[in-house]
Image: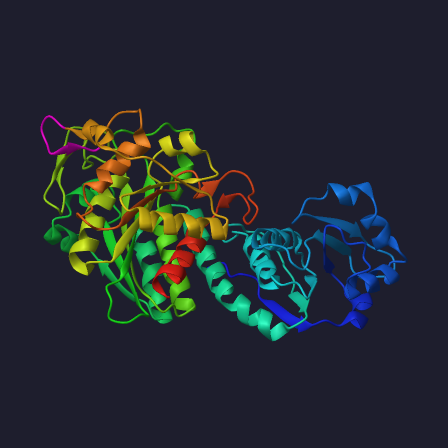
């Protein structure tokens, strides 16, 4: 997998600055005149006043908090650039991470020295740097992009390293998710996906793979119907992290459609190549489970993912078919491109039957309708429980991951009524994201706290974001890890 750049934390050594090659990144408060920071004063002397002149210019005034600008090949330094980053000692978490991302985006072969001094959130700077320095290159024949060493000079290296350690675990979880979502479908088959999850046993996770024979015995007709047109076998992978006491686990459930053609209700050709990301929900669950294991979380969490491929083979299910779910409900398949909810229906029911969790959150790149509603800035959040939903939205806000609660209700649910079965798998174009959530709610037991996260707009984007290059974002790993820390680790 792609690994985050290692970051070394050092005591501040101002005498070494003149001879540093590569890049130097200096964190400067928005109103700093370079007289308050020893590092800034030293660099100003070395550059013969160039730093002070820049900090007094109109150009510096236009730089927003968390953003940066370069002084290229500054006189008096061996560094190829002096990067000036607008973030003061008391910058908030979002600004600190944004500042780190500005540094991480520019890291080159010669590396970077970050002068963070006594910044309170230096660990968050390192986190933002690590996240933004991600690049997915395993399928390029050119030499991988070289990225040199990253060092941070801070007031208390040991304390900053201690604070950064759990963040490094989250960064690795995010990278694992991004790699999975970015992989092409001819590489990330259901077999390959399951093997990558099984490999996490070396981290201390318990991993179990349920093959088609076991799924048939369990009665997962909804899930199996989706994958019956593919040569790739359908699977359910169960990952358990038992870091807490004897209490029941919290459950995460992910949609893992490794490629979605739409089946017989085939999608248009334009943009279909992006359907390699239709396993994004499973990717996030995998990334969270990896993070929990790496940081030895003191909580019990089970992650379950349904892995299938939706193909238009001669064996594929047809519009009009009726399938029977593990719950026992029958479903009229009106549109084979509404397949993710069929996968989740069986995995949600299995999670409750086997583990009797204290609550559940499922994630899925489920509907185009949520993109129409919220764009690519926010995930749609649907829930039957205000306490769990509010806690999750608080976690999203803390981690800077956009999320917005959407409505649910009986009127939407009524749109799923079928003439020949217990329900249809779609309810029409209007309110499509909501009727999808109402479908899933039918497979959530009474009294079970539950959230459904529709990440269709946030799992993969076509432009850079603050903390990620274009492509897979890893959205949700940070917020779910935060939720587990705050709600279940006490």
- In this rendered view, identify the residue nearer to me: 157 or 306: 157
Q: Residue at x 87, y 53 (%)?
A: 50
Is residue 80 placed above or below 411 in the rendered structure?
below
Main structural element of the magenta stretch: helix, strand or loop?
loop
Residue 354 sits in which quadrant? Answer: bottom left
Image location (x, y in percent) of residue 273: 42, 37
On whether residue 424 falls in the magenta region, the answer is yes
- Of all residues, the one furthest to the front in this rendering is 387
| Count of numbered badges drawn on the protein | 0
Q: Is residue 407 visible?
A: yes
Q: Residue at x 83, y 62 (%)?
A: 41
What is the span of residues highlighted in magenta in the rendered image? 418-425
In the image, taking residue 25 as reference, residue 423 lies left or right, namely left
Image location (x, y in percent) of residue 229: 22, 39
Quadrant location, the C terminus: bottom left
Residue 194 sits in which quadrant? Answer: bottom left
Image location (x, y in percent) of residue 465: 55, 44
In the image, taking residue 216 as reference, residue 134 lies left or right, namely right
On whether residue 435 falls in the magenta region, the answer is no
- In this rendered view, identify the residue nearer to me: 168 or 487: 487
Which colouring convention does the figure follow?
A: rainbow
In the image, taking residue 313 as reference, residue 386 lies left or right, namely right
Residue 416 sits in which quadrant? Answer: top left
Image location (x, y in percent) of residue 433: 32, 33
Q: Is residue 368 visible?
A: no
In the image, taking residue 205 as reference, residue 101 lies left or right, namely right
């Amino acid at each position: 997998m792609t690994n985050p750049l290692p970051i070394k934390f050092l005591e501040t050594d101002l005498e070494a600055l003149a001879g540093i090659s590569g890049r130097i990144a200096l964190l400067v408060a928005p109103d700093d005149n370079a007289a308050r920071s020893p590092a800034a004063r030293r660099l100003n002397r070395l550059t013969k006043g160039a730093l002070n002149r820049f900090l007094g210019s109109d150009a510096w005034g236009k730089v927003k908090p968390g953003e940066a600008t370069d002084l290229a090949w500054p006189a008096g330094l061996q560094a190829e650039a002096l990067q000036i980053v607008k973030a003061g000692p008391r910058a908030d978490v979002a600004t600190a991470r944004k500042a780190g991302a500005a540094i991480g985006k520019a890291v080159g072969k010669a590396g970077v020295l970050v002068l963070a001094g006594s910044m309170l959130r230096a660990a968050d700077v390192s986190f933002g740097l690590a996240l933004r320095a991600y690049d997915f290159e395993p399928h390029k024949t050119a030499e991988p992009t070289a990225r040199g060493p990253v060092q941070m000079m801070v007031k208390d290296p040991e304390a900053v390293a201690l604070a950064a350690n759990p963040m490094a675990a989250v960064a690795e979880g995010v990278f694992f998710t991004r790699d999975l979502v970015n992989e092409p479908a001819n590489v990330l088959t259901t077999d390959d996906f399951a093997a990558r999850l099984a490999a996490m046993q070396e981290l201390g996770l318990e991993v179990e793979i349920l093959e088609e024979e076991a799924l048939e015995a369990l009665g997962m007709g909804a899930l199996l119907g989706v994958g019956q047109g593919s040569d790739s076998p359908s699977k359910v992978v169960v990952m358990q992290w038992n870091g807490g006491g004897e209490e029941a686990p919290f459950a995460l459930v992910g949609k893992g459609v490794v490629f979605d053609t739409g089946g017989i209700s085939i999608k248009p050709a334009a943009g279909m190549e992006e359907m390699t990301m239709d396993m994004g929900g499973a990717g996030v669950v995998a990334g969270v489970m990896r993070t929990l294991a790496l940081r030895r979380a003191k909580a019990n969490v089970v992650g379950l993912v349904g892995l299938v491929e939706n193909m238009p083979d001669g064996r594929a299910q047809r519009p009009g078919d009726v399938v029977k779910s593990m719950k026992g409900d029958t479903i009229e398949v009106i549109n084979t491109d509404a397949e993710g909810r069929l996968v989740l229906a069986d995995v949600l029911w299995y999670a409750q039957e086997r583990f009797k969790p204290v609550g559940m959150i499922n994630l899925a790149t489920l509907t185009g309708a949520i993109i129409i509603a919220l764009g690519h800035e926010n995930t749609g959040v649907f829930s039957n429980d205000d306490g769990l939903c509010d806690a999750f939205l608080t976690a999203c806000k803390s981690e800077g991951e956009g999320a917005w609660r959407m409505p649910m209700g009986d009127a939407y649910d009524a749109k799923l009524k079928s003439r020949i079965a217990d329900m249809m798998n779609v309810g029409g174009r209007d309110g499509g994201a909501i009727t999808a959530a109402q479908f899933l709610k039918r497979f959530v037991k009474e009294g079970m706290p539950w959230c459904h996260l529709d990440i269709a707009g946030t799992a993969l984007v076509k432009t850079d974001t603050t903390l990620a290059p274009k492509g897979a974002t890893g959205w949700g790993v940070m917020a779910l890890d935060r939720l587990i820390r705050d709600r279940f680790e006490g």
